[in-house]
Image: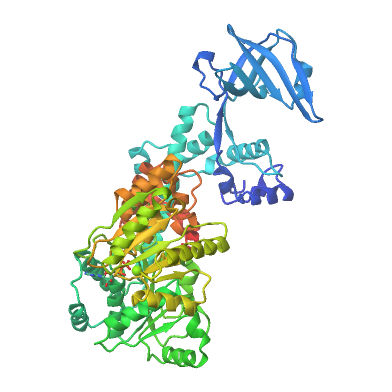
Amino acid sequence: MEMLKLSDSIGVLKGVGPKKITAFNKLGINTIADLLTYYPFRYDDIREKKISEIADQEKVTLKGKISTLPVLTRFGRYKSRLNFKLLVDHDIVNVTFFNQPYLMKNMEIGQELAVYGKYDLARQSLTGIKILTQQATDDFVGVYRASKELNAAKIKKVIDQAYQTYQGVITDLIPETLRQKYQLLPRAVMIRDLHFPNSPAQNDLARRTAIFEEFFLFQAGLQSLKQKERTQTGRLIAYDNQVLKQFIASLPFELTGAQKRVVNEICYDLHHPIHMNRLLQGDVGSGKTIVAAIAMYAAKTAGLQSALMVPTEILAQQHAEKLVEIFADFDVNVALLTSTTAKKAKQRRTLLENLANGEIDIVVGTQALIQDPVIFHDLGLVVIDEQHRFGVQQRQILRNKGDRPDLLAMTATPIPRTLAITAYGEMDVSVINELPKGRKPIQTSLYSKKQFSQALNFMQAELKKGTQAYVISPLIAESEMLDLQNAQDVYENLKKHFAGQYQVGILHGQMPAEEKDAVMQAFKDHQLDILVSTTVIEVGVDVPNATVMLILDADRFGLAQLHQLRGRVGRGQQSSYCILVADPKSEYGKARMQTMVMTNDGFVIAQKDLELRGPGDVLGRKQSGIPDFRIGDPVKDLAILQVAQQEAQQLVKEADFYENPAYQALVKYLQENIITTQNFD
Ligand code: ADP
Ligand code: MG
């Protein structure tokens, strides 16, 4: 007999020809393994129930006798309604079927019938879904996501066939010890009870096992990938520790404890032959930039170049200026490369030459950095700011411009700790969990739209102290044009309101880069007191003299975005304020505004956001980096997620993991199903 393998194509099954293969492929099913893990997305419980036990709108099966002659009412050509009464024990239930007139043919008074449908408690009526034949034995059945070419029944039949044929070669992936510890099912039983459960209880256990397995395999894959990255020979960057210390001592402030810790973590990686792949996570204003500067300076002392890539021109320019300032007394050559530089042909040519000959030590830039002609002399360190704004591919292109350079990715996007390990599993994570000393917490308050003039008065009182303010115009997700119109309206109104008192400027995404820079510069130089803006200033902008962040229609923004916006103030010595103007209508909207008022902690906000919205929506699935799981839900099944992750991490760390026969099936699975970072985009 030939060897059966789960990696066999589904084409080996009876009744699955080329057409069906294509149809299955469309559902993401290529192999027997895919088929067996194509689990039902829900289950219909069609066991009979007593009338008194049924909840309103519950789907149930009722068994009884037809007690009135069915009446068919037609309306329109294709629409109809079939009514009859069913005697269930001693209760009469009104049953209605829509658009299935043919059911009437076989009905007669006194006939026994089992009807599956949706129950309406108040009217004691049932909207029929189907009539069950007497032979129906399955009373708890899985329902599959079907397609035009493949109905659920066919899918189920093929899965049944596959299971019958292949059940003997389904091996356990979760090691026996863990299976015992968490009382999980053997894999073959799990698969059987997910597709063909006899009872909800049996199905529950199978689901629990499958969720654990899914999280466990994912994490084991990530961990082994990470281990490989770390042990593969990267470059040892032999920086000059003495000189680096002098540089750190020269800074106008002392590093926070958290900054010192992450600097150590990064320096350790730099100076070992590890291919660093590290995420630096820290709330807005926690001081990530200086940490990056220290790392880049370290590379410079080892004779290597660094590149800092950021998502916007404004940010690139700001970082470049800051670095020039920081390195004023040190021999570091900083350059800026953006699409604006790219337009100045001569300047650009010189810049590219100096990058190629090693004259430039640090280049700060936008995506212009990854465009073709940019060649480095010797790129040793890549830093990506606001990393979630870039795709894996873009990060990789920049990385490929050097000889295995180390990578430091920075993000202020507070992913809840509980999910960070899933989203960033393949990276090492350094966290700055402390703000620089002396920061005063930003006070946030909520004003209704009616109270807008009060909000303006408050802002004015602050401006009188010589500080500055941001005003964020409402976000209209569907249309950039409307966003712009809105910003312009707000701008005109404020200009009128503050005429002769304060200078108002406007910034929006559709302005040419030069104009944006000019406005930003004017705001930095305090030629403008108030900056009206769409969300283009969301990331990274640093103007310490700004103390008021006023956000219009705040309930239209996501919590993470509001938190980012708020992080633009509270950067100096004075107290800062965030004013949310909104009339949230739903409970959910109110809860979100309340969260902003209650806390400044990005992680708490992220956790709250997650609870309110679910993980896929927190930042958009792409940005959050949280992969799609088939059966597990990182929020609902959080407890299982944590345990599975913990166990996987520990297991992969075991010295003999790859050799131990007890893990052979798992190791083989991981080798055949390599998770790459590509999965995250
Ligand atoms: P983010 O983490 O949001 O990128 P930045 O790097 O822009 O934060 O830092 C915010 C501000 O805090 C900057 O003005 C920076 O100079 C300042 N800063 C950074 N570290 C410290 C520190 N240890 N003590 C005081 N101020 C600091
Ligand atoms: Mg920053």
Rendering coords of residue 575 (x, y %): 24, 61
The residue under the point 41% across, 83% down is 336
Q: Height in image: 349 above or below 468?
A: below
The residue under the point 34% across, 45% down is 643
Q: Height in image: 82 above or below 599?
A: above
Q: Height in image: 458 above or below 238?
A: above
Rendering coords of residue 529 (x, y %): 35, 70
The residue under the point 65% across, 51% down is 26
Rendering coords of residue 657 (x, y %): 35, 56
Along the viewing direction, whichever of 121 and 118 lies nearer the viewer? 121
Determine whether, in the image, residue 359 is placed left or right of residue 261: right
Determine whether, in the image, residue 577 is placed left or right of residue 224: left
Write down the quadrant of residue 66 in the picture. Answer: top right
Q: What colouring method underlies this structural image?
A: rainbow
Determine whether, in the image, residue 103 is placed left or right of residue 274: right
Confirm whether residue 387 shows in the render. Answer: yes
